[in-house]
Image: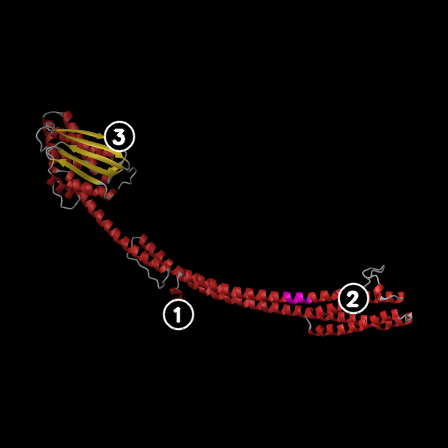
Amino acid sequence: MKEQKKRFMHKLSLNKRLALVTLLILIPMITLVGYLLYLLNDTNQAFGNVTESITYANNYSTEFRERMDYSMYLAVIRGEPVSMLEEGRVTVNGVKIVNPYSYIEELDQAFDIMEEIATVSSNKNLATRMQRTLNSLSRKVKEIDENMDKSVNYDENLAILRGDIYGLTEIIEGGIQDYISAENAHFSIIRDEMVEQCRTAFQICFLIVVAVSFFAWMLSMMASRSVTRPIRQLCDMAKLLAKGDFSARTDTEAEDEIAVLTTSFNDMAGKIGNLVENIKTEQANLRMTETKLMQAQINPHFLYNTLDTIMWLAEAKQTEDVVSMVTWLSDFFRTTLSKGQDYITVEEEKNHIDSYLKIQHFRYQDILEYEIDIEEEIYDYMIPKLTLQPLVENALYHGIKLKRGMGKILIQGFQKGERLIFRVIDNGKGMDEKTLNELRKRIAGLESASDGGFGLSNVNQRLQYYFGEEYGVFLESEENVGTEATIITGAKKNITLS
């Protein structure tokens, strides 16, 4: 049974689980409130009926006998018909004079109402009996009134008044009092019933609240566990991922939003693991490429030729030239190594190619001129090291040296929006369209790079890795006119060095 409930909860979505708990609480509570409202309304109605009945009867409990007796007394002692009474006048003793016929008719109608609103069955019969007594009283009033017209003596009318009318009004007053007493007794019964109903209602409320609280607690715990347990597993998995364990996975039996989250998290972990492995592979390839580039820059022929030049300068006693050559060579290799950093400033890159060109100009001063025009405003920006030097070297060996006569290399650098633009321009041999297209393919990595394209391909690969595919090296060339290499990098400062 417990497993069935568990499976049932797992099949529900989070919204449905919460709605189930809410309904479990609301439905009994609404039922309980409805029952209490019904009980309260029933009790109020019963109290209202009794109060209305007692209040209405009280209007005639003392006033009827007093007014009727005194009015008939005045008619008898005056010896005048009842029609001669000053109806509505209040005497000095505070009694209101009434027309006996009208007053009897009023009370007769009042008894009809009392019979209708009576809450005790015996009072309905009592009202009927009192109406018969009223008929007797009406006849006695009429008898006295007729005696007035016949000039019957005073004593006879006084005897009817004292013997009949006073007795009848006393009976009617007693009947009204009995009516009120019965209603009061019923009022007490209703009160006792209300107390008992309240006690029963309290017990029912207590049982319902306890039952609802228990089941709500059970469902809440089941819903909570079905949510917190997979979330806790996800947290544990996230910790493993943070430690580098991308093989960690978590499962859930639920079919709700948590299951979707778990599945997505597992997929994400797998993709992150694959991505990390790809990044490691790319980093390893990049390091290998940079190592090859550095090895290429430490060209033994370039080093041997430079050392040979320094040696014959030393033999010729040209000390200042020796110092200059050694200084340029030292600066060149210092920037090449750059303490293992991936990024250097534009100013450092500019100094690097300046050292390189000074050494080469000393050797090829008959065929080489150069100019470096890099704006000082971009000196503090960071670029990957060895970005410009391979292009300058390419311009020298594959452009200037293959041309007859004096050649020139121009290096420009400036900022354009969020990009840094560098150009290495030479007026050397240049390339035909076919050769240019092949070199472009080697730079893009579509073909394996030869000696003529490895350095350019490496620079292009690193720029795209660091900044994006829209960055890199772009070539334009015309045979016997020259070549223009454009390098586009991102304009960044304060890059963390590695």
Vertical placement of residue 433 versus 169, above or below: above
186 vs 137, left or right, is left
Q: Position of residue 73 (x, y in %)?
A: 86, 66
Q: Which residue in the structure is indicated by mark 2?
A: 103
Three-letter amino acid code of the residue under disc 3: Glu
Q: Nearer the viewer, mark 1 or mark 2?
A: 2
Sooner in the amino-acid sequence: mark 1 or mark 2: 1
Quadrant housing residue 363: top left
Residue at the image point whose x is 37% and y is 61% from the top:
256
- The percent position of residue 281, horizontal first and vertical second, equals 22, 50
* Relative horizontal placement of residue 175, taking residue 462 as reference (left or right): right
Q: Quick one: quadrant of the C terminus?
A: top left
Residue type, label 1: Gln
**Amino acid type, callout 2:** Tyr
The residue positioned 63% from the left and 66% from the top of the image is: 43
Vertical placement of residue 278 versus 453, above or below = below
355 is within the stretch colored magenta: no
Asked if residue 115 lies left or right of residue 221, the reply is right
Number of the label disc, if any, that sits on residue 96: none
* Separation of marks 1 and 2 at Cα, in angstroms: 80 Å
Q: Position of residue 345 (x, y in %)?
A: 25, 35
Image location of residue 326, percent across then percent down? 16, 30
Based on the displayed image, in which of its 4 quarters is residue 486 positioned? top left
Q: Magenta region, mostly helix, strand or loop? A: helix
First reached walking from the N terminus: tag 3 or tag 1: 1
- Whether pointer 3 and pointer 2 mark residues with C-beta atoms closer than 8 Å, the reply is no
Q: Which residues are magenta?
A: 44-50
Question: Residue 4 got which mark?
Answer: 1
How is this picture coloured?
Answer: secondary structure
Per the rendering, the mark at residue 376 is 3
Asked whether 399 or 327 is in front, the reply is: 399
